[in-house]
Image: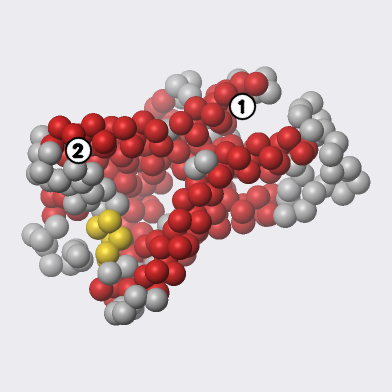
């Protein structure tokens, strides 16, 4: 977390905006998105820790009904929530266009390499998914994690389409902002690669803290892997694919298997 030696704090990085503007812009984007989620997650975790009973006896609900018993109103709220959550991504695209970087194409979120992105994303999801599930079951059994309930939506026709849309929304917001945008900004502000990796991965872990210690550690490790892959490939496209596949399997899989298999914890 250190500025590049020999540069005045208010000076402009090569070919760009002054540092002060880049800093404030980055803080605003985070305050409107995942930074706010991290603060909310911390408050939620403190609440869970101070509540009587163990963490594993409490539930972290990810996709639940906004209007129980009113499916059309519920659907409207679900779609509204998904759409508004994507607004910070639109802001990031605008900011990158403003600086002449080509919008989201600058961070590799475009349609120029669909098949490599899909293939790499699927391989990453397969590797992380199995390890992640085993880690979650272990830390929950140890009492260091809440019981994660990926979905508790009513059994209506739009349930699984909404879960898939929610998974895609999560993946786009997180990978565009916490990997592509944040690393680009920290690089231009003179942060070291290790410092930027630490900031991105700790932020990812922080906004999953509502799930417990396991949610924080597991997602922080995933953040390290994703940053290293982004540095290697120069694209967030494969990371969006991987994250979307992980969440789709978690959300839809829980909906299909909860209460039907003994190894899957339920609230």
Q: Is residue 48 visible?
A: yes
Circles 2 and 1: CB atoms closer than 8 Å: no
Q: Residue at x 28, y 56 (%)?
A: 61
User: In the figure, 221 relative to 87: above or below?
Assistant: below
Percent position (x, y) of residue 210?
40, 61
Task: Determine which residue is flagged by label 2.
Answer: 74
Sooner in the amino-acid sequence: mark 2 or mark 1: 2
Q: Residue at x 73, y 50 (%)?
A: 192
Q: How is the image coloured?
A: secondary structure
Q: Residue at x 50, y 56 (%)?
A: 39
Q: Quadrant of residue 96?
A: top right
User: In the figure, 119 relative to 139: above or below?
Assistant: above
Left or right: 182 as drawn, with respect to 47: right
Percent position (x, y) of residue 1?
72, 55
Q: Is residue 216 visible?
A: no
Task: Determine which residue is flagged by label 1.
Answer: 95
Distance (Cα) linking label 2 and label 1: 33 Å
Left or right: 221 as drawn, with respect to 9: left
Percent position (x, y) of residue 201?
55, 54
């Amino acid at each position: 977390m250190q500025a590049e030696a020999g540069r005045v704090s208010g000076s402009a990085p090569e070919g760009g905006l002054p540092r002060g503007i880049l800093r404030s812009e980055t803080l605003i984007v985070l305050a409107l998105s995942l930074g706010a989620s991290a603060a909310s997650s911390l408050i939620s975790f403190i609440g869970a820790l101070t509540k009587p009973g163990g963490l594993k006896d409490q539930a972290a609900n990810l996709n639940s009904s906004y209007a129980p018993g009113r499916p059309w109103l519920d659907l409207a709220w679900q779609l509204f929530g998904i759409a508004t959550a994507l607004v910070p991504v639109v802001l990031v695209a605008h900011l990158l266009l403003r600086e002449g970087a080509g919008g989201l194409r600058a961070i590799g979120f475009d349609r120029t390499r669909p098949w490599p992105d899909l293939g790499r994303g699927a391989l990453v999801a397969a590797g992380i998914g199995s390890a992640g599930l085993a880690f979650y079951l272990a830390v929950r059994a140890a009492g260091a994690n809440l019981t994660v309930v990926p979905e508790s939506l009513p059994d209506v026709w739009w349930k699984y389409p909404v879960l898939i849309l929610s998974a895609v929304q999560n993946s786009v917001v997180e990978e565009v902002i916490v990997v592509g945008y944040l690393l680009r900004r920290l690089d231009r502000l003179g942060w070291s690669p290790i410092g930027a990796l630490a900031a991105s991965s700790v932020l990812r872990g922080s906004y999953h803290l509502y799930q417990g210690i396991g949610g924080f550690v597991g997602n922080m490790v995933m953040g390290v892997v994703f940053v290293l892959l982004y540095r290697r490939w120069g694209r967030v496209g494969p990371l969006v694919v991987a994250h979307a596949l992980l969440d789709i399997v978690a959300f839809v899989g829980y909906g299909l298997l909860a209460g039907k298999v003994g190894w899957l914890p339920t609230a």
